């Protein structure tokens, strides 16, 4: 991956979502229209935090977030999510 020129502000985090499942455990191929939106990903960039609240996640962390969390953006052909740190449920 090339150097990313996106720097989240304040308490926002840039996340690269994990790929959606292509097959079920029994081998059935899932069509694009039926794929579940992934709810985990890798933190790519982190903002500086709020005045009284430092950031707790860091670049490279694997995280779980809500199904409808964040805003999808596409940068140089790659899909990312930008969300508030409070939208992240857990670090795995």
Image (cartoon, rainbow, N blue to C red):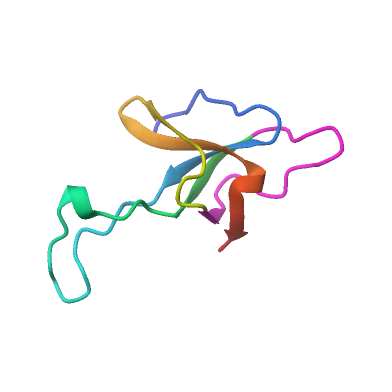
Q: Main secondary structure of the magenta part?
A: loop
On screen, 30 above or below 8? Answer: below
Q: Does the magenta-highlighted stretch encompass residue 6?
A: no
* Residue at 50%, 23% in the rendered image: 5
Residue numbers of the magenta segment: 47-65
x and y percent of residue 28 in the render?
12, 68
Q: Is residue 63 left or right of residue 67?
A: right
Residue 75 appears in which quarter of the rendering?
top left
Q: Residue furthest bottom?
A: 26
In the rendered image, residue 49 lying in the magenta stretch gets the answer yes
Instruction: Name the residue rendered at 72%, 49% in the picture.
Output: 56
In which quadrant is the C terminus drawn? bottom right
Query: Who is closer to the viewer here, 75 or 5?
Result: 75
Quadrant for the N terminus in the image: top left
Left or right of residue 35, residue 84 in this image:
right
**Residue 79 location (% of width, % of height):** 36, 35
Whether residue 63 is situated above or below residue 1 in the rendered picture: below
Q: Does residue 58 appear in this view?
A: no
The answer to whether 66 is drawn above or below residue 76 in the figure is: below
Choose top left, top right, bottom left or bottom right for residue 26: bottom left
Numbered disc total: 0
Q: Is residue 89 visible?
A: yes
Indicate the position of residue 72 as horizontal and vertical percent values.
42, 34
Question: Which residue in the rendered view is the most extreme toward the right?
Answer: 52
Q: Position of residue 43 (x, y in %)?
A: 54, 45
Q: Nearer the viewer, residue 56 or 36?
A: 36
Which residue is located at x 60 percent, y 57 percent?
Answer: 89
Displayed quadrant of residue 59: top right
- Horizontal side, residue 23 vs residue 12: left or right: left
Placement of 83 over or under 89, stated as above or below: above
């Amino acid at each position: 991956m090339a150097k990313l020129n996106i720097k989240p502000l304040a308490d926002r985090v840039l996340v690269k979502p994990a790929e959606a499942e292509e097959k079920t455990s029994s081998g059935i191929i899932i069509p694009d229209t039926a794929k579940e939106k992934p709810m985990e990903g890798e933190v790519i960039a982190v903002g500086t935090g709020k005045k009284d609240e430092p950031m707790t996640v860091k670049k490279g962390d694997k995280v779980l977030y809500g199904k409808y969390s964040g805003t999808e953006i596409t940068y140089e052909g790659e899909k990312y999510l930008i969300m508030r740190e409070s939208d992240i449920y857990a670090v795995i």
